Amino acid sequence: MHFLTITDFDANELQQILDQSQALYAKNVSDPLKGKNILFAFEKPSLRTKVGTEVAINKLGGSVIHVEAPSFFGGKILHAAGHDPSGKREDLKDTMKNVNQWCDAVFARVFDHQTLQTLAQHSEVPIINALCDQHHPMQALADFLTIQQVFGKHSKPTITFVGDRNNVAYSLIEMGLKLGYPMQFTGPKNYYWSGAQLQYFEKLAQESNTNFKHHIDPKDILPGSDVIYSDTFVSMGEEAEYDEKIKTFTPYQVNKTLIDLTGKTTYFMHCLPAHRGIEVTDEVIDSPTSLVYQQAKNRMVSSLGVFHHFLKPE
Ligand code: CP
Ligand code: NVA
């Protein structure tokens, strides 16, 4: 079974992975992944996902093999003479059918979600999404582990994502609604969810007997919010839109004035990397109610549960 999105999993299964993560971390279990080789293939940069997950796999006794992006994703080669005239090194199908012969899982960070689907189609081993343009399921697990550590497992704080409707926001809202948390979103109209996405979130909220509220004006959304979540305004792969997005998103910077709109003690979360002075101020990210480094630690803890779950040790 693959782990490409939160979409494919129900609340029980997601909560089971979170509980297993905590248990594995507390027990310091020895070597359930001994003899397993996990391939890391990243098309984009990464610190937390790469290092946090590799540490988790080491703790479980597994091994990590890093392959550079062009060797895995069949990127263009410089001297294509005599090869494919497009300069492409290899079809992704062939790459995956080779990897099937050696490895027990692939952990891949890609530009396009379709790349993960192609890998999954030709894979005999689990494909785990390390971030794509649409989803960041590993981040969402770490974030809800953090929220449950801070608020307890049975309390359901209201969580508001402020900013861009991106991969992190999608997986966070999706997982929160599945687990029954009241989820909120505020962001500018030019970078808003599609009608179909909003309908999907509303359906999830109804199924879990919770609420999904959204509005372009933070003032309409923030009062009463227990957690404010922020991410970069310009995701990897969107560099060409930098100037336009930075201008558009200015009113969504998480600063003291914006936090004060909640009217209560509010925790701050961010998947990191953060752009200080752009989507968040130093004052907020360095405040005592900022959870960002606890989230970063939990990228490792929740990876214990994910790799244990999907590699099904005996
Ligand atoms: N939050 C996160 O995925 O960080 P990296 O891009 O550093 O892996
Ligand atoms: N939305 C960001 C998340 C980085 C962890 C990006 O995709 O670049």
Image (cartoon, rainbow, N blue to C red):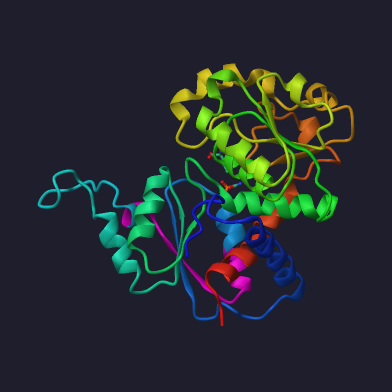
Quadrant position of residue 93: bottom left
Which of these two is toward me, 293 or 135? 135
The residue positioned 59% from the left and 61% from the top of the image is 53
The residue positioned 47% from the left and 24% from the top of the image is 241
Q: Does the magenta stretch include residue 133?
A: no
266 to 215, vertically: above or below: below
Residue 64 in percent (x, y) is at 49, 68
The answer, for residue 272, to whether it is visible in the render is: no
- The outermost residue toward the right is 264
The answer, for residue 83, to whether it is visible in the render is: yes
Does 13 sit left or right of 118 as displayed? right
263 to 158, vertically: above or below: above
The residue positioned 23% from the left and 53% from the top of the image is 89
Residue 273 in percent (x, y) is at 62, 41
Which of these two is toward me, 241 or 261? 261
Does 241 sit left or right of 222 as displayed? left
196 to 249, vertically: above or below: below
Residue 6 in percent (x, y) is at 57, 51
Residue 287 in percent (x, y) is at 83, 37
Which quarter of the image is occupied by the C terminus? bottom right
Q: Does the magenta stretch include residue 65?
A: yes
Q: Which segment did they paint magenta?
A: 54-71
Question: How many labels, in total?
Answer: 0
130 to 268, vertically: above or below: below
Quadrant position of residue 220: top right
Which of these two is toward me, 173 or 85? 173
Quadrant position of residue 279: top right
Does 188 sit left or right of 105 as displayed? right
